[in-house]
Image (tube, rainbow, N blue to C red):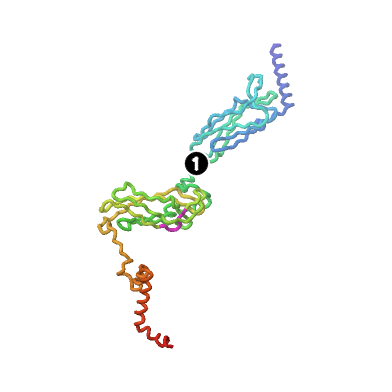
Amino acid sequence: MLTHRLIVLLLLFLGLQTAVIAEDHQFLPPEQAFKLASGALTADSVELNFEIAQGYHLYRDKFKFQSQSEAIEIGAIQLPEAVIDHDQILGDVWVYRGGPLKIVLPVTNNSGQQQFKLLVKYQGCADKGVCYPPQKTLLDLQLPVAAAAKSQAVNAFFQGVKGIGSHLFSNELLPPEQAFQFFASVKDPEHLHLSWIAADGYYLYKDKISLQIEQPGRAALAPYQLPKGQPHDDPEYGQVEIYRQEIAIDVPLLRNGNEPEVINLTAKFQGCADRGVCYPPMQTRVSLDLPALTAAASVAPQAVSTNSDENLSEQDQIVKALKQDGLALTLLSFFGFGLLLSLTPCIFPMIPILSG
């Protein structure tokens, strides 16, 4: 009986002592003792910031992090260094004491999901010997869009347009097939007529134009010459030549045979808009029907001599003769021409003049 009374008195004494400690020290609520702020650093990392009040500490081994979003996973976590503290119940433990504590969590977000729910578990105590129960906080974070996802979205939106200088007027850009139109036709059995038309505010690079016949058979492209372009100081390629509006050329063909033939011509070219947006290299494939090569077309016409004496006028013949003759013969020729002129009716008005 005495033993039971002693136990009751001991419990009352301990309860009164705890009440005195609690009254002397106003312990903070857990949300104030361990203030938690969170935010997403990048699309693949999340930062947690604890502000531990003075006189309180958090246990390092009590941290737990769980993803509540199925499409997002948490990677290996590197917790900051802690200090050793001797706990009366747990012994030597690693703790974080009053002050800021930053924890960075790597995340894997392959689906590009922006909404991320994170469950954070932790536990701490007051240095005066009062410990809090394990705490749980569910965070609703907004992840930024990954750079790769942005790039894919931009490329898909502009259909392969690269080198985007500004997105402000991107919705006004013409599709490539409208900004740069290519036309090809057969001029004659030995020539193709090709032309490009660039829309207003667009231009083509001269050195980016190339032509090729796929699987050449009896017909092949002969060397061709592009016209001179307009000088242009390009921010990417430096000093280049460009074409605006329309460019047209006749490309000669080398025919190995007289039979008609179908050729597949591939034209490659690249251009930009004046606002600083460049299109990726483009190519167009056309099929052309070459007619049969006749014997008259295959034989070069004989050149007609424009210097033949038969085609020269009398005046031209005289001038040619004077150029080819020597000085003595030229003087004799002038004497003869003067004698002949004296016998013409035109000399009659000169008689009274000479007589006077």
Above or below 157: residue 121: above
Q: Within 10 angstroms of label 1, few (less than 14), some, or many (20 or more) residues?
A: few
Q: Residue at the spot x=41%, y=51% of the render?
A: 209
Q: Quadrant of the N terminus?
A: top right
Is 314 displayed left or right of 111 in the figure? left
Quadrant housing the C terminus: bottom left
* Residue 18 picture location, percent across and down: 71, 22
Instruction: Look at the picture and state if 180 lies above or below 151.
Output: below
Residue 261 appears left or right of 282: left
Count the labels in the image.
Answer: 1
In the picture, residue 48 is in which quadrant?
Answer: top right
Main secondary structure type of the part rendered in magenta = strand
- For mark 1, what is the residue? 149
At x 53% / y 51%, what residue is drawn? 168
For numbered disc 1, what is the local secondary structure? helix
Position of residue 79 relative to residue 202, above or below, is above
The answer to which quarter of the image holds residue 196 is bottom left
Q: Which residue range is magenta in the image?
A: 241-247
Q: Could you tell me residue 25's position as x and y percent?
A: 73, 27
- Depth order, front residue of 33/176: 176
In magenta segment, residue 246: yes
